[in-house]
Amino acid sequence: MKLAVVGAHCGDAEIQAGAIAHKYAKAGHEVTFVHLTAGEKGNPPHISVEDYRKQKIAESEKVAEVLGVETITLDYKDAELVFDDEIITRVATLLRRIKPNVVITHWENSIHSDHALCCKIVQAAQLKAGLPGFDLEGLPPHYYGIYHSENWEDMEGYVPDIYVDVSEEFATYLEALSHYWFIMNSSSFRYYDYYEALGTVRGCVNRTKYAQTLKFPTGSNVRKGAYIPGYEL
């Protein structure tokens, strides 16, 4: 199995599905985080936007090392994503190259425009990557399944379909998150505490110590379960 987690900013893929990613990477599957932007506009006062972009990319590389996954950050600008054919084609081409069986991304409803656009881009790229009529750098067509994961900014209408037991992976997940400055130092939101508590709460519902959840796209044939369907560990 190849798994890709696509987030709007460095940090989104990790907080949403980092423990799931680590679980599958440990089992020998290929896992890649794709960040459409670095999320650089949330720079602290003492760091310029460009320097913070570099810092966040460096942090994402350290997090990926801890979790045992690959990471890619594209060069789109934070808070300036647009839904157009250029970015759809670029993401579709990248995903043809990565060839994931499954892509995890943001839920469709969000208070952050970049998150909502990221979801739409991944869904549009799914069609373009899968149709043989599109010539994308000579790469063969590739179709992937889509699941959504939890982000505190994307919770409107989010009701989990799949609870993945990440009890054995959760300590490593928290260690990985600690390498992001914004997760440990944000004055606007307690990221670390929230995601530690969320994993605990989802674990309570799942009757495990910790869990992370996934959701099927709207209109999909929903199948409740404890694993990504077809990829039980």
Image: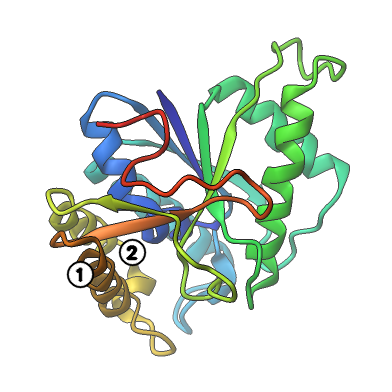
Whether residue 34 can be seen here = no
Mark in the foreground, 2 or 1: 1
Where does residue 1 sit, x and y in percent of width and height? 40, 23
Q: Are marks 2 and 1 in contact (CB under 8 Å)?
A: no
Q: Quadrant of residue 232?
A: top left
Q: Quadrant of residue 112?
A: bottom right
Where does residue 98 sit, x and y in percent of width and height? 54, 24
Q: Is 159 situated left or right of 125 in this image?
A: left
Considering only order in the chain, which callout, 1 or 2, is on the residue closer to the N terminus? Answer: 2
Given residues 69 and 16, the one toward you in this image is 16
Where does residue 182 sit, x and y in percent of width and height? 38, 73
Q: Dot 1 corresponds to which residue?
A: 204
| Three-letter amino acid code at the position of disc 2 | Tyr
Query: Mark 2: which secondary structure?
Result: loop
Q: CA distance from mark 2 to mark 1?
A: 27 Å
Classify 197 as above or below 3: below
Whether residue 69 can be seen here = yes
Label at residue 180: 2
Q: Residue at x 64, y 22 (%)?
A: 96
Quadrant where the C terminus lies? top left
Classify 22 as above or below 106: above
| Three-letter amino acid code at the position of disc 1 | Cys
Given residues 8 and 152, the one toward you in this image is 152
Q: Quadrant of residue 150?
A: bottom left
Q: Residue at x 17, y 52 (%)?
A: 172
Q: Residue at x 73, y 37 (%)?
A: 125
